[in-house]
Structures are given as C-alpha cells and as structure tokens.
Amino acid sequence: MSGRNNTAGPPADDEHQRFARYLQDLAQVHQENEADLVSLILRDSDATMAQSAVARHLDHRAARLLADARFPGWAYTVATVIAEWEFLTRRLREWTLLRSITMGDPWTAEDLTTASDWFQRKAAETLTSPAALTLLISAARTRRVRAAASRRMAQRHQ
C-alpha cells in the first residue's frame, strides 16, 4: 500500500499532498482505528515524511491525553505499532516521562537530564514540578531551557 495516502482515497504521488492527507486522517481517526492508520502511514515509501506525520500526531494526541487516565493504554497501543521506529519510540517515551512528572509518578534526574533538547524545552514550558524545574534550571543542556525553566519557576511563585 506504499504510496497511498489512505485506504479511503486515491494514491497521491506528491509527498506534500500525502503528508497533508495523513495529518487530516490522523486528526479525525477514532481511537479504535488509530493503530491501523499509523501502521499504514509508516509503510509509505517516504519514511521521513511518514515519521514526521506520525510524530506530529503523537505530539497532538499525547498533549491532549497527558493528564487523562487513558494515556497509558493509548501509549501502550501506539508503542506496539512504532516499536521499530527509533525516533518515534523516543518521542513517545519522552511524552510518557512528561506525564510521569506531571502526575507525580516516579522519575529520575537522569531521565530528565539525558532527555532530548525537544523534551527539555517542552518540560520547561509545561511542567509545574519544583523538583523538575530546579533540575532544569541547573542542569539543562541549553541556556534557552535553563532560562525558560527559571521563568516558569518564577511564575509558580507569583
């Protein structure tokens, strides 16, 4: 099915058209069909484009489900589909870490300091955990993240 933009539509030769269609389909997919659609997209002949569409979807879905009790089940289902895709697996793992910190579940300093720059930026922008923000202020890799964590910590005290 490589080269098809969706089982419901005709093939699109242009990867930009397929990408747009994938994003549209992923935005509208019902949870029970999500894994099948992600799997279909990841079989596209343009692996980079397919991963990009799925990563964007993961970001949107994970952000919406972050504090939702359905997050663990969703993450488990998606993890089985993306297991062979290193970038996507890491992104999902980092969303799971963000959820752990957000929900007050166990995490380690090493989890936070070895996470990607993307994760550290996202964490500095969204977390309210004093322990996580303090760690980012002192140990984040970039000045941008350290500054953002510092601002976020200051906001907590206002």
Image: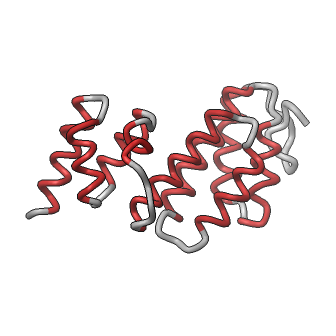
Q: Residue furthest bottom?
A: 69
Q: Position of residue 49 (x, y in %)?
A: 67, 29
The quadrant the C terminus occupies is bottom left
- Is residue 84 depicted above or below 126 in this figure? above
Residue 69: percent from left, percent from top:
56, 74
- Foreground residue, 42 or 130? 130
Using the image, determine if residue 13 lies above or below residue 148: above
Residue located at (29% from left, 35% from top) = 140
Image quarter of the N terminus: top right
Rendered image quadrant of residue 5: top right
Q: Residue at x 58, y 65 (%)?
A: 71
Name the residue rendered at 73%, 58% in the picture: 77
The image shows residue 132, relative to residue 51, as above or below, that is below
Residue furthest left in the image: 158
Q: Residue 33 appears at what percent x and percent y?
A: 79, 61
Q: Nearer the viewer, residue 55 or 16?
A: 55
